[in-house]
Image (cartoon, coloured by chain):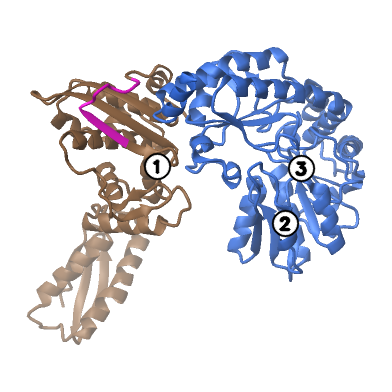
Chain colours: A brown, B blue
Amino acid sequence: MWEYTKKVRDLFLNPRNVGEIENPDAVGEVGSIICGDALKLTLKIDKDTGRIIDAKFQTFGCASAIASSSALTEMVKGMTLDKALQLSNKDIADFLGGLPEQKMHCSVMGKEALEAAIADFRGEAPVTEPGERVVCKCFEVTEEKLRKVIMENHLTTVEQVTNYTKAGGGCGTCIPDIEAILREIWALKPLPVKPKKPRKLTNLQRIALIQDIIQRDIRPALQADNGDIELIDVEGSRVIVALRAMCIGCRMGGVTIKGIEEKLRELVGDDIVVEAAAE
Amino acid sequence: MISPIYLDNNATSAVAPEVLEAMLPYLKEFYGNASSMHTFGGQLGAAIRKARESVAAIIGAEPAEIIFTSCGTESDNTAIMSAIEINPQKKHIITTRVEHPAVYNFCKHLARKGFRITFLPVDNAGRLSMDAFYKALDDDTAIVSIMYANNETGVIFPVEEIGAALKERGILFHTDAVQAVGKVPLNVKKLPVDMLSMSGHKLHAPKGIGVLYVRKGTRFYPYIIGGHQENGRRAGTENVASIIGLGKACELAADSIETENSCLSKLRDKLEKALLANCPDARVNGDREHRLPNTTNISFEYVEGEAILLRLNEFGICASSGSACTSGALEPSHVLHAMGVPFTALHGSVRFSLSRYNKESEIDRVIETMPSIIKELRLLSPYGRERMAAKVCK
């Protein structure tokens, strides 16, 4: 059984603003009986002030769909159209005190109906243009809608996308397409890479790690330039090395030491200091 | 919380007081292990033997043909896996599009492993296409698994005819009889099945106990491997208390099955008739003739099932729905879908499933409550208005 908030239960059992406004100024219809939920929103708008005077809804759907629709009508009454357009599906969910994750698509349906109604009032093209690529054929979800909902709600997994849009919840053949869209969107805006937490190393581990890095990463790079390096000692965070072969007397010796220090700081610890051994 | 009007017995049923009574000593003082060498544990063997006899009796089997498992799902999985193990060269399985997930999803899983699965279709009334069944049989078929009665609609399949056809051809036959045992008389002496699954909690025993009947002489390979329990056919320490409980539940069911059936079907029919009469645009899903006596599945067009259930819940009435929204899945019931129930009715299905503990007064309460719930939800819905208006005009 779903864990619905008191507010959801209240608006489901005693929904406000049910019905259809006669001679409405705006109508927004989304969803279909095939998909399992549908919402028809009608608005009365004051043309001078651009304010929504009245809002009514008819919803076919589950408890959270009915509650989301009712919440939407409560929220937009008295709002200007511009303000109303700024409402997000999250605002609707928040108004309800939250929705179960799997029911978030109900709040998205509310937002879509509102957008459709305002577009209708302004004589704009419907939100979904014909000929657009339908990604999920079971629930007729377009790529544009997917992108919008993914960006607005910062969704990162297919499961979340299904919860918010239903896409991928039917036969599942579009799941690779949804994955591709997610990858594309978040590759443009990669999340900040979490800084590596400094590990607490014992002295032995620390020395072994430094030896390993010098052996595997640093020496091959230097040897490629006919140089070499030898690890002389590790004293706490001080790493003492001796440059060998072509590195000896190389004018770039200081730079090389600095480079090694950076590498070791990145992989071992921030406090590493690399020094050249006094010969 | 008010005491519920529980009409969801195909989901699970109340543990009978007599069953609980019979179980308690085995949860308290007799906590031994039946396999032990000491009397304290070993004495449980006799109690298990008696329970096995009672369970065998309800389906007309011999005690040695009864394997206790943990649930109906385990029994179903075991039957199919056994058939695969003993027919390693055969790669074809036949089942139906309306099976319980315990078989349906298990077969889908096997399809991913390279098995060829035939999912037999049903007609609008949920009746199996026997034509498709005969056509699907071939010499590569390892097992046929077809349910005895459907959990959502209660429709009973012609298991006898199917079994006879398979016996002639020497193909293994398993039936998931989880919804049937205890509700309709069933006798494996007359029923040509090789394996049959049942589940305790559907007939007033607790959850966590199931049975797989395996006909004597049927080759069998265990699914759960380990100790020697159940004659080496199902490893794992016996769930003694639940086995005793199931034995008791089977005795109770056997005693009352005939009288109970006519009583249940009377109540069910009363409910069904009244709801169809008092709620416009309602329809029964499934064949009303060949059906479990306790089940009715009714679709209320233009409204959604979860909404109906939660409104019923306000009155303490428990039922279930094939609606997508109730399960967390987004697709409505695969059973109703396979039956070609129209979309206007697919999301608004409600299943009422009765038990011997339901009283007529409870049914009356549902009959009183339901029409106004449907009416209120229809007023919320953008669909079906023209039809409703037309009805008023008449």
Q: Are marks 1 and 3 in contact (CB under 8 Å)?
A: no
Give x and y (percent) for residue A78.
18, 20
Circle 3: element type: loop
The residue under the point 89% across, 26% down is B255
Circle 1: element type: helix
B198 above or below B224? above
Mark 2 vs mark 3, foreground winner is 2
Closer to the camera in the image, B323 or A132: A132
Give x and y (percent) for residue B240.
80, 36
Disc 3 marks a residue whose amino acid type is Ala
For the residues beneath circles 1 and 2, the answer to whether they share a chain is no
The chain under label 2 reads B
For the residues beneath circles 2 and 3, the answer to whether they share a chain is yes
Q: Is residue A6 left or right of residue A240?
A: right
Give x and y (percent) for residue B12.
68, 31
Res. A115 mark: none
For the residues beneath circles 1 and 3, the answer to whether they share a chain is no
Which residue was labeled with disc 3?
B177
Quadrant of residue A16 within the rendered picture: top left
Distance of label 1 from label 3 (alpha carbons)? 35 Å
Which residue was labeled with disc 1?
A163
Disc 1 marks a residue whose amino acid type is Asn
Magenta residues, start to end: A18-29
Closer to the camera in the image, B8 or A4: B8
Q: Is residue B122 left or right of residue B256?
A: left
